[in-house]
Amino acid sequence: MTAAIEIKGLNYRKNMKPILSNVDLTIDTGKIVGLLGENGAGKTTLMRLIAGVAKGYKGQINVANETGIAAKKAVVSFSEQLLGFNQNMKIERIVGFYEDVYPDFSNDKYNQMAGFLQIDEDKKLSQLSKGMREKLIIGLALSRQAKVYLLDEPFAGIDSMSRKKIINSIIRWKPEDATILVSDHYVSEIASVLDEIVVIKDQTIFAQKSTEEIREKFGEGIEEYYEKVYEGTEMHD
Ligand SMILES: Nc1ncnc2c1ncn2[C@@H]1O[C@H](COP(=O)(O)OP(=O)(O)OP(=O)(O)O)[C@@H](O)[C@H]1O
């Protein structure tokens, strides 16, 4: 199986401070992977590096065999926080922007998703609640026909019914050969859809385990395993 994401010897510093050190990580094509770690562990940074948004790193990052920044952006759909948009912009204009910028953006898919997630296109960005904004971000990200989707904390500030909807939309709209990396602080809600988890701790990959391995070898669910990692009773890979 070819790797969707292949990272070798990645080191990244920001303002002289090491953020990620000696990261080696291979994610196989087609998997749904949970990227876990506490606040400030480096989840967003790793996603930004994979997406080609953050630069100035040492090491190798290949995404679907692409190494160039522009090529990576073409194959990766990253749930960006829409910070670059004017807050008075209507959602329909933002959707139009996505359509113009990303050749793989599917309007059909977006319309289905917008209906499913109840996104109101007439609203301005500034009129959206935190949860509505998050739904829009996910809707836009999943409407691209990308090879790799990076969903950065898609559940932050979202009520439990909407979380279920988002999880369902991830499952429903995932192309079979697409790979999804989804970050979160805790795993309870997404545990059921994950094929494997990657835990970032102490600036590096602390563990990478398949759901099956956790169940078979440790006789427990992802949640219990992850709790032990943070209590310090679980050993480094
Ligand atoms: N612009 C920046 N300048 C300096 N340090 C930064 C910057 N952005 C992030 N960091 C640092 O990088 C580290 C990783 O941050 P990052 O946002 O990637 O973590 P995270 O795991 O996504 O956290 P959270 O779960 O809180 O979102 C943190 O120590 C943070 O302080």
Image (cartoon, helix red, strand yellow):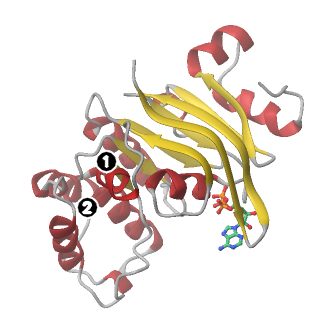
Q: Label 2 to label 1, Cα distance in Å?
A: 27 Å
Q: Which residue is drawn at 36% across and 47% down?
A: 165
Above or below for 228 versus 85: above
Nearer mark to the viewer, of 2 and 1: 1
How many numbered marks, from 0 up?
A: 2
Amino acid type, residue under disc 1 in the picture: Val
Q: In which quarter of the image is residue 117?
A: bottom left
Above or below for 107 versus 34: below
Circle number at residue 184: none
Q: Quadrant of residue 139?
A: bottom left
Residue 205, percent across and down?
A: 70, 38
To which residue does mark 2 refer?
118
Of 2 and 213, which appears nearest the observer? 2
Circle number at residue 75: 1
Q: Which of marks 2 and 1 is nearer the N terminus?
A: 1
Q: Quadrant of residue 26?
A: top right
10 Å crowding of disc 2: few (<14), some (14-19), many (20+): few
Question: Can you see residue 187?
Answer: no
Residue 25, percent across and down?
A: 60, 34
